[in-house]
Image (spheres, helix red, strand yellow):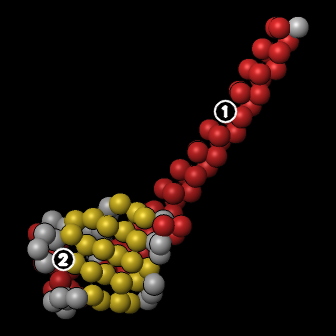
Amino acid sequence: MKFDFMFKTKSKILHIGSWVLFFILLLSFGYFYQRSVFIQKANALFDPKEKAFTGVYLPWPIGHPSLVGDLNPQADSRIRIALGYEAGSITTNGMTLIIHNSDGTFFVHAN
């Protein structure tokens, strides 16, 4: 009887563990897919030639989908000139771009 109880417990633990692993994998695939779609949209709107926007993607449950990262100085100046960006934010097609003057970091936010 003792072995039967241990076998059922191990079976339940393995079953629950496999479902948890499945959901973790499903969530991670969804995160990376949404991240790539958001980066493609940000690059298409704000830097279609060079595609300089990459970074940390913050998904919807935390707030509105957002992308945070930094730009190298060449990309920063190129994007500012192409968009006529001086300070503040620029909004187009449901996305807002904010570039911080102090360190070249950016914030792309879906409206």
Q: Is residue 93 left or right of residue 68?
A: right
Above/below status of 49 relative to 33:
below
Above/below status of 34 relative to 27:
below
Quadrant that contains the N terminus? top right
Q: Residue at x 11, y 74 (%)?
A: 102
Give the image location of residue 38, x and y in percent.
45, 70
Earlier sequence position, callout 2 versus callout 1: 1
Above/below status of 32 relative to 86:
above
Among the 4 quarters of the image, the one containing residue 94: bottom left
Q: Which residue is mark 1?
A: 17
Disc 2 residue type (three-letter): His
Quadrant that contains the C terminus? bottom left
Farthest front residue?
2
Disc 1 residue type (three-letter): Gly
Distance of label 2 from label 1 (alpha carbons): 44 Å
Q: Residue at x 27, y 80 (%)?
A: 98
Asked whether the viewer can see residue 48, the reply is: no
Q: Is residue 102 left or right of residue 20?
A: left
